[in-house]
Every structure is written in C-alpha cells, then in structure tokens.
Image: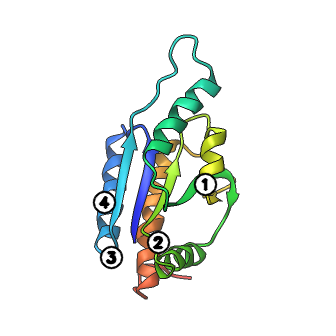
Amino acid sequence: MKILFLTIGKTSTPYIAAATDDFIRRASRYQPVEMVSLPDVKGGKGQTEDQQKQREGQAILSALQPSDMVVLLDERGRQLTSREFAGEIERGMNAGLKRMVFIVGGPYGFSPEVYARANKQLSLSKMTFTHEMVRLFFAEQIYRAMTIMRGEPYHHD
C-alpha cells in the first residue's frame, strides 16, 4: 500500500520543509510514502472563501483515484493515539488498499465535495497549528507509525 500525503501549497519555511522531508524519507524506507503539494489557490481580488475552497476542492478531487481511502486532516476529526494511528495504517495494508491518502487542505478548510469524498476525518489536536507545522507533525506521525508496526524502539509509551 502506498501512503500519499496531499497538501495545498508548499512549505516555505526552510527548516520546517527540511524536517518534513526528512520524516517522509525515513518513513519511505518502510512503506512507499509520497508527499505531493498541489498549487496554492491564492485568494484573488473578489474571490470569496467559498470560491477558494471550491477551487482547492477541484484540485484535490482530481488528484484522487476511485479506490483511494481518503482521510482528511480536519479539526473536527477523530483524535487517535500514535498506536491507534499505526493500527489504522496497518488495517489499510491488511485490507489490500492500493493507496491511503491523507489530505491537509487550504486555510479555509475543505469544500463540501471533498468532505463527501472522504472516508474519515482525523484531528491532530484541539489546538490550531499553521499548515506548515501540521505537515511536519503529521510526517513525523507517519514515520512513528512505521516504527510502531515494526516494533522498533522509536516510540515510547
């Protein structure tokens, strides 16, 4: 199974980008993991938040395959421990999924069409983080999940 980490816009802070890339690279040693950044849809003159969400939603939906398990990183999603998250990935692998796609949306969230396409919603915290920090934290959690599934000593309960 491939894990696709889909984001809107690039990470522009160099040290966050470097750390995120490092965790994706580490996780890729265990399982195919790819981070794809879709172009940022800038809020143009006269463009509403809903219009921006619609444009981002179209880009997200066009990047998905019909068989994808789609998980939105969303503040209203379910919170999991790192072990529970590793279990979710392992269940996807055991179910024979081709791709599990985790998505970080734009600054205003997701369009209704993206919510309708999603299989699950996951929240990293009740706190609010920048999109760049979410990418870093989530990349680390993907790596942590890989080490948990392999019984390696990275994670401590």
CA–CA distance in space, label 2 to label 4: 25 Å
From the viewer's perspective, is 41 left or right of 87? left
Q: Which residue is mark 2?
A: 97
CA–CA distance in space, label 3 to label 1: 25 Å
Depth check: give the residue in front, 95 or 153: 95
Question: Which of the two marks, 3 or 4, is nearer to us in this view?
Answer: 3
Q: Earlier in the sequence, mark 2 or mark 1?
A: 2
Question: Which of the two marks, 3 or 1, is nearer to us in this view?
Answer: 1
Give, as a three-letter code, the residue at label 3.
Tyr
CA–CA distance in space, label 2 to label 1: 15 Å
Which secondary structure lies at badge 2?
A: loop
Q: Residue at x 44, y 67 (%)?
A: 142
Q: Are marks 2 and 4 in contact (CB under 8 Å)?
A: no
Toward the bottom, the furthest residue is: 151
| Picture quadrant where residue 62 is located | top left
Q: Are marks 3 and 1 in contact (CB under 8 Å)?
A: no
Q: Earlier in the sequence, mark 3 or mark 4?
A: 4
Tell me: residue 115, above or below residue 93: above
**Looking at the picture, how far across and down is residue 120, in whole percent?**
63, 60
Q: Which residue is mark 4?
A: 22
Give, as a three-letter code, the residue at label 1.
Ala
Tell me: residue 89, above or below residue 94: above
Q: Which residue is mark 1?
A: 118
**Looking at the picture, how far across and down is residue 34, in whole percent?**
34, 58
Q: Which residue is mark 3?
A: 30
Q: Are marks 1 and 4 in contact (CB under 8 Å)?
A: no
Which secondary structure lies at badge 1?
A: loop
Give, as a three-letter code, the residue at label 2.
Leu
